[in-house]
Amino acid sequence: MLPASCAGCGSDLGHLCPECRDLLTSTPPAPAAALPGAYAAAPYDGPVRRLLLAHKERGALRLAGPLGEALARAVRSALGPSPGAAPLLLVPVPSARAAVRARGHDPTLRLARAAAGSLCREGLDARAVPLLRHARPVADQAGLSAAERHHNLRGALTARPPGRFHRHGAAGRHPRPGPTDPGRLPGPTGCRPVLVDDLVTTGASLVEAARALSAAGLPPAAAATVAAAVPHRRRVPGLSPDR
């Protein structure tokens, strides 16, 4: 019966208080330096940082909705005022399989699905599509310099052939495409891939993800993240960003 504490500021006003929700909904998305056309919904600082960590590391899954809406805002900013009619494929930067097992969920895929749902409610044709996967093991990014992160991830990702990706249904049926998973994907000229992630720091993950998509014939139209790291922030042990 005790009131839930806000994951962003700790106030006893529910898992996401009005003030922290306002940070996610009213902060103007800004360009991120990782890639041309990359936007972040908010700085990775204060309550936004704590909200992302709560969702990612502590399984606060109810935060996926508001964080996904923030990601959708960044997607809209990245695409500009005329997103076009082609389907948007929100392609999450994949986490390592070991990290997904340890956390018990895939936070970036969950946010991509929430963002796709938010964009669909606005009338856009958006789908979250986990096209990327790791082709080899990578070292933990925490503590690595920008150059070391880029070297660590170079060639680490690969993309599934777009025409062969299916959402598997019961008894071998393939359900109709929806906002969270597609049936048969359109070809490279019939969709607009958008890379999405929870956080960008040096941009190494987005750069490698863009390379892998481009190699598969699906160069990303844009990239979007919930947050972008604040330069020169003092790193807190155990809570350092990994992107």
Image (cartoon, rainbow, N blue to C red):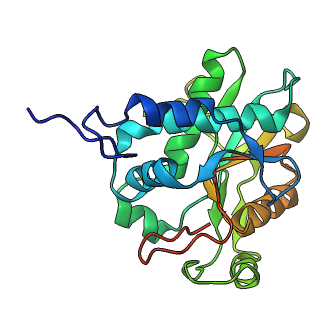
Look at the picture and state if 67 lies above or below 155: above
Residue occupying the far right of the picture: 189
| Residue 24 as seen in the image, left or right of residue 196 | left
Residue 156: x, y in percent? 69, 74
Quadrant placement of the N terminus? top left
- Which one is in front, 34 or 193? 34
Q: Position of residue 142 (x, y in %)?
A: 55, 78
Residue 65 makes an appearance in the image:
no
Q: Position of residue 198 (x, y in %)?
A: 58, 52
Locate residue 100: give its quadrant.
bottom left
Q: Is residue 100 above or below residue 141?
A: above
65, 229: nearer the viewer: 229
Rendering quarter of residue 69:
top right
Residue 156: in sight, yes or no?
Answer: yes
Q: Is residue 135 above or below residue 188?
A: below
Residue 209 lies in quadrant: bottom right
In the depicted view, which residue is nearer to us: 96 or 237?
237
**Location of residue 108 in the rendering, given as x and y in whole percent from the top left corner:** 54, 50
> In percent of the image, x 37 and y 33: which residue is there?
17
Q: Is residue 52 above or below residue 89?
A: below
Query: Residue at (31%, 37%) from the top-left corner?
Result: 15
The number of numbered discs placed on residues in the rendered structure image is 0
- Is residue 74 rendered to the left or right of residue 51? right
Residue at the (75%, 31%) spot, across then down: 76
Q: Is residue 42 left or right of residue 209?
A: left
Q: Where does the C terminus fall, quadrant-wise?
A: bottom right
